[in-house]
Image (cartoon, helix red, strand yellow):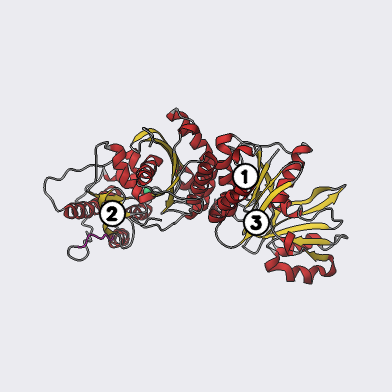
Amino acid sequence: MNILAIDTSSLVATVAVINEEKLLGEYSINHPRTHSQKLMPIIDELFKTLDITMEDIDLIAVSRGPGSFTGVRIGIATVKGLAHPHNIPVLGISSLEGLANNISYSKELICPIMDARRNQVYTGVYKWQDYRLKNVISDRPLTIKELMDLLIDRDEKIIFLGDGLIRYKDEISNTLGDKAIFAPQYVNMQRASSIAQLALDKIKNKEAKPQSYLDIAPTYLRKSEAERQYEEKMKRCVVHE
Amino acid sequence: MKENLITLGIESSCDETSVAVMKNGREILSNIISSQVDQHKKFGGVVPEVASRKHVENISYVINEALEIAGVTFKDIDMIGVTYGPGLVGALLVGLSTAKALAYSLNVPLVGVNHIEGHIYANFVEYKDLEPPFVCLIVSGGHTHLVHMKDYGVYEVLGKTRDDAAGEAFDKVARAIGLGYPGGPLIDNLAKKGNKDAINFPRTYLEDGSLDFSFSGLKSAVLNYLNNSRQKGIEIVKEDVAACFQQAVIDVLVDKTISAAEKKGLILKYPSLKLCTDNAAMIGCVAYYDYIKGHGADMYLNVVPNLKLGEKL
Ligand SMILES: [Zn+2]
């Protein structure tokens, strides 16, 4: 089973092709140029080098978010277009789980953080148990203070990774001291091979079922600003009545 | 070249997700338009993030419906045309990303289409024998252009708005008289019941000979009229305000268009209402003519939210 995996939830555009035996290839670019100009060219490049086409792909794994709304949408919209003509099944994977899975078989907690703007991060907490990655605190947007409050009393050390470190590394370090460990660059950002491996494992362990291109959708974890403000307004109206 | 070229057109520049299947550029096999207007009504206008979310939810369904109605499969598709600007960046990106991936997956050519050009080409879809040259007035929520179309893909922009697009003025006036969104059809409906000579709103023609437009003065005049009337306790007849405002816009549009054509015995043509809204049939039509002229795009194609008419990649 050949799996094409894609992650565009952060600034990194990353694609990989994996099967049960090996990682055939992976291409990642961490450059601020838009995903619209990075993603299809690197898929094309990787396919040409591997001498494969979409006909050779049995499943597409895609990072469904959270992350940059636009970035995630470019990934999902691209997957819909790629999968549609050949009706290739699609599996959406949490971008945070994908990040956590970059760190293999650690005894520490793993805490991916992605800058979510508005002074928040998208985060979740993961842990290896019996060589399987488990979600300990579910994916959600939090302020760094709220995240630190959740972690400060834990006994385990915590490995942090993700683009949220650019802004919050010092604050984490100051709050948690020696308990905080920061991942090295080669695994600090999104990697499509990690998304691909999760897809492979989840299908093998029957933890997830592939979806149709029709129904694969981003996980935003947040309403649009306009909807949020509209709901606030409606709440105030109810109070006034 | 094949006898018949089938184009899949994709449009997502604002709040309509539309997909069409076109035969030889001008014949509509299907033209599906999924409007989000109900989603945006409560916000009083199009919210870009909401639009983008809806586009990504809808797009594959709309593609399937377009193929089904046209009675074709992907095997019949010879090229894909997609709007890459102007429009809302997030909304454009959904259509463009899907179109690029589809073209890649199907191994067919991709053509990036200018949305404003699409509005002009809607006339080719409506009138099978129409050929350039002609003068074309393009008015919508986002743009007001007066264009001399010399040949397929060859334009001279004679005039455009210096401030608000005609449609923006409609939206703002609609809000001011409490009509809601979208302003165009609401004002038009109300205007039918009003007296278009009741209030004298200004017509802005700008300097002598200019074919540019300006609607912000008219918009302010309407707002002033409403304020003054309210202060003086004069009853506001919304129907009359709508009728007089609309007439003031129309007078300028018509006068400038006729003076741009500079000829007697003019023939007026305009597409049916469905082809005047944002739709993918017109995008597929542009793609066809661009393609037979040798234009195409590669996988680096990006959206250009402020794309101008006549700009080619
Ligand atoms: Zn338009």
Residue at 54%, 47% (x, y): give it.
B53
Residue at 33%, 46% (x, y): give it.
B119
Q: Chain of mark 2?
A: B
Give the mark, 3 or 1, whose residue is nearer the N terminus: 3
Residue at 47%, 47% (x, y): give it.
B40
Residue span colored magenta = B210-214
Q: Which residue bears the numbered disc 1?
A: A51
Badge 2: how crowded within 10 Å, few (<14), some, or many (20+)?
some
Tell me if residue B148 comes above or below residue B106 in the rendering. Answer: below
Helix, strand, or loop for circle 3? Answer: strand
Helix, strand, or loop for circle 1? Answer: loop
| Label 2 CB-ligand 1 distance < 8 A | no
Helix, strand, or loop for circle 2? Answer: strand
Identify which amino acid the numbered label 3 is placed on. Answer: Ser
Q: Residue furthest left?
A: B264
Any mark on residue B81, and which?
none
Q: Chain of mark 1?
A: A
Residue at 21%, 49% (x, y): give it.
B196
Any mark on residue B155, and which?
2
Identify which amino acid the numbered label 2 is placed on. Answer: Tyr
Q: Chain of mark 3?
A: A
Tell me if residue A185 comes above or below residue B150 in the rendering. Answer: below
| Count of picture labels | 3
Q: Which residue bears the numbered disc 3?
A: A28
Was residue A113 drawn as part of the magenta stretch in this picture? no
C-alpha gap between disc 3 and disc 1? 19 Å
Main SS of the magenta part reads loop
- Asked where in the image residue A171 lies, by quadrant, the reply is bottom right
* Nearer to us in this view, B197 or B61: B61
Q: Are marks 3 and 1 on the same chain?
A: yes
